[in-house]
Image (cartoon, helix red, strand yellow):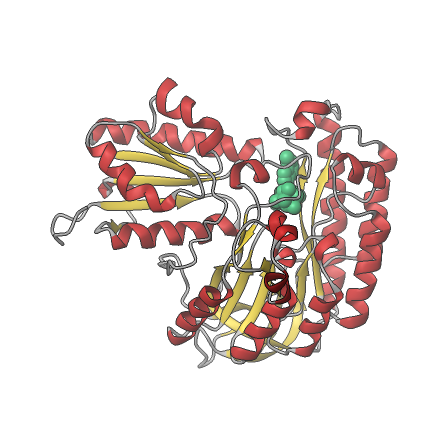
Amino acid sequence: MLTSVDNKKKYSIITYGCQMNFSDSEVVSSILNKHGYQSCDDFANSDIILLNTCSIREKAELTIRKKLESFKKLKKKNSNLKVGVLGCMAERLKDKFLIEEKIVDLVVGPDAYRDIPNLLDEVELGNNAVNVILSKDETYGNIDPSRFNSNGITALVSITRGCDNMCTFCVVPFTRGRERSRDPKSILREIEELKSKGYREITLLGQNVDSYLWYGGGLKKDFKNASELQKKCSLSFSKLLDLIANKFKNMRIRFTTSNPQDMSENVLNTMAKHKNICNHIHLPVQSGSDKVLKLMNRKHTVNDYKKLIDKIKEILPGCGISHDMITGFPNETNEDHRLTIELMKYVKYDFGFMFKYSERPGTLAYKKLSDNVPEKIKQKRLEEIIHLQQEHSFINLKKFIGKNCEVLIEKESKKSASHWAGRNDQNIMVVFPKKNHKPGDLVNVKINNNTSTTLIGTS
Ligand code: 5AD
Ligand code: SF4
């Protein structure tokens, strides 16, 4: 371990992928700081560069690979530079990166971050260092993330890790392991700490937050074997949400991601009960065709999903709803694609993240289904749904014109130094003239214009 301030080794972390990865990078940074390393923004001056990687689609992996290639030059200039791969690419590509191509010095999977200081010691001794073991109970509950990339106003708080859903297209259950929930005490302690530092908004994070279940630790799948007492004292997501909203009345609370089969009416009622829980639900559906949903091993039908959407609109009128959608999944026909469009027209989402299917080695779809929708058709279908989403977003955002929104100021607008940017309750970006407000203020903004992604107003 390094202790002297002058001798501190400098590290930089580059993060790719989802919010969970950004949250994990803050955990890694905290572990390294505690062990005498120092964070650094400049690669050229770093002793260690860590890439927190994403495997969700092939394109993400290719981008990271290019970045790794670019560090070869830096390594030539600075023979002491160490490069590490963290996160989702670790397990699948460890041998390739470490042994075959020798382009990295250490490889660490998402559940092994506490081991990074030891692994770095190994690297110093000239050894390759690798730990990709997945855990049954690691949630990093007692680690205060270092918030090194933070705006000081909004923060991510991880509440579950891993995923048990096994959607056939998805690598996450393989790269991040089984689902486990974090001790509510450590969640509350982390939010308390954030509050004391002046943070105004938290986003509770997990691959499947509605499936949160604390019964004293352990995998979600083992809950059925828990004792009666454990079952009686268990804490569900709606109860956790209620607890947090009651305890932190001056903080805005968001959560992501929800899965249709796990989102209960209790969660919707808890959202309705608390003004400080933001009115936005990210509810991936992936396809509007029951045939495709079945092939994807999604645990809901289109009808279940529509009923849930109706419930959300009934209990939480005006709630923002967003989605994830995949086009060109194996065997997807024109008719399946038409059903996806029909579902989008039914829900009229506020925004969404849309992707072409990307075959991932190791997944069930890779093993059992042929990636048989031609690239051109995937692309055409993707463009169609993106275009439709833009239309819906524009129409939905237009409805805000003339209305007032409560906006939490996060930062300066990217397009204008005289405007602030922040999000409203529905998670829509709002920009407005700065006047004498400051980041962290909750401001009433009257909306007078919109694009398909942003509301424009005055305070
Ligand atoms: N191909 C395309 N998109 C995918 N996603 C997950 N796996 C794949 C894949 N193999 C998308 C899903 C998911 C989001 C995080 O990424 O829509 O909800
Ligand atoms: Fe992947 Fe499905 Fe789990 Fe989301 S719910 S992380 S898409 S397996």
From the viewer's perspective, tell me whether residue 317 is left or right of residue 168.
right
Please state the horizontal and vertical placement of residue 427, each as a whole percent of the image: 62, 64
- Left/right of residue 61 with respect to residue 406 in the rendered view: left
What percent of the width, then of the height, locates residue 145? 38, 58
Which image quarter: residue 326?
top right
- Decide which of 345, 38 is in the foreground and name it: 38
The residue positioned 67% from the left and 35% from the top of the image is 356
The residue depicted at 78 percent of the width and 40 percent of the height is 293
**In screen coordinates, is 438 left or right of 166?**
left
Q: Is residue 424 visible?
A: no
Q: Position of residue 223 (x, y in %)?
A: 62, 53
| Along the line of sight, the residue nearer the viewer: 3 or 135 | 135
Estimate the x, y position of residue 408 in percent, counting from the top left: 53, 73
Up-down: is 442 above or below 410?
below
Q: Nearer the viewer, residue 61 or 389?
A: 61
* Residue at far front of view: 228
- Based on the displayed image, in which of its 4 quarters is residue 270 positioned? bottom right
Q: Kindly tell me whether residue 57 is visible in this rendering.
A: yes
* 102 in relation to 149, above or below: above
Ligand 2: give its quadrant.
top right
